[in-house]
Amino acid sequence: MVRSLLLLLFCLACIVVSRSALSSNDFKGREARSDGLAAWQQVYSVLTSPRCINCHTATNYPQQGDNRHHHFANVIRGPEGNGVPGLNCVSCHQSANAESTGVPGGRNWHLAPLSMRWQDENDQPLSSAVVCHSLTDRTKNGGLNAAGLLKHNEEEPLVLWAWNPGRKQDGTMRTLPALTHAEFVAATRQWIDAGMPCPR
């Protein structure tokens, strides 16, 4: 009888300890998701800044300026996002900014594919949730996994250009994203480490 009672007490203690551990793990999981979502919002603030969204359009043309107006000379996307014959992107956009003319430049200048658009057809930025789900969908993001996304944000020349956008035609500097590049990469890494959570 005493032995049975001791066994029962032991089992009850195990259940209490297990529930406590599960509760603690659940709390840590929620905390990690919350931190990941906060990091994602920082990433999103950069992706939807003019330096990024002007080429991540849902339109048939690139946009320009902080007010995101239609690209001059009626430049259009073309089938590969590089413009059309006689008016392709690299005709004007060289591998570096042209400070004398105000034409921005970077290696392989082109529009992002429509699967990576950060705006809707009415020029409004897509919601944080929609952009996040697009970015994590390997059928839309060029097949990039978490490591590939981090490397893209760390090293891709056109991403880096956002923090070195050069001068406008009037000689004034183009605005930069709200975060530094180092902060953007750190936020990307924190979001990835948290499991790349997306807002619901």
Image (cartoon, grey):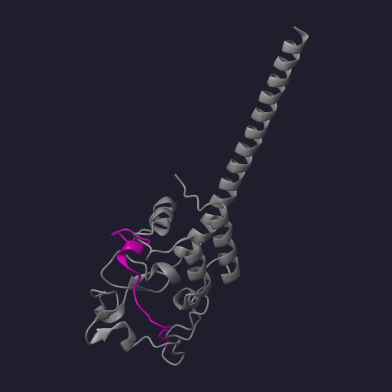
In the picture shown, does residue 58 fall above or below 76? above
Q: Residue furthest top?
A: 1
In the picture shown, does residue 177 fall above or below 7? below
Q: Which residues are magenta?
A: 102-123
- Determine the residue positioned at 22% across, 85% down: 85
- Compare residues 160 and 1 and report the one nearer the observer: 1
Q: Position of residue 180 (x, y in %)?
A: 58, 70
In the picture shown, does residue 49 fall above or below 20? below
- Determine the residue positioned at 45% across, 61% down: 145
Screen quadrant of the N terminus:
top right
Residue 138 belongs to the span the image colors magenta: no
- Determine the residue positioned at 23% across, 74% down: 79
Q: Position of residue 162 (x, y in %)?
A: 48, 74
Q: Position of residue 7 (x, y in %)?
A: 72, 16
Screen quadrant of the C terminus:
top left
Circle count: 0
- Compare residues 19 and 35 and report the one nearer the observer: 19
- Determine the residue positioned at 54% across, 59% down: 42
21 with respect to 97 (left or right): right
174 with respect to 123 (left or right): right
- Compare residues 86 and 124 and report the one nearer the observer: 86
Q: Position of residue 74 (x, y in %)?
A: 25, 78
In the picture shown, does residue 183 fall above or below 74? above
Q: Residue furthest bottom?
A: 100
Dominant SS type (magenta): loop
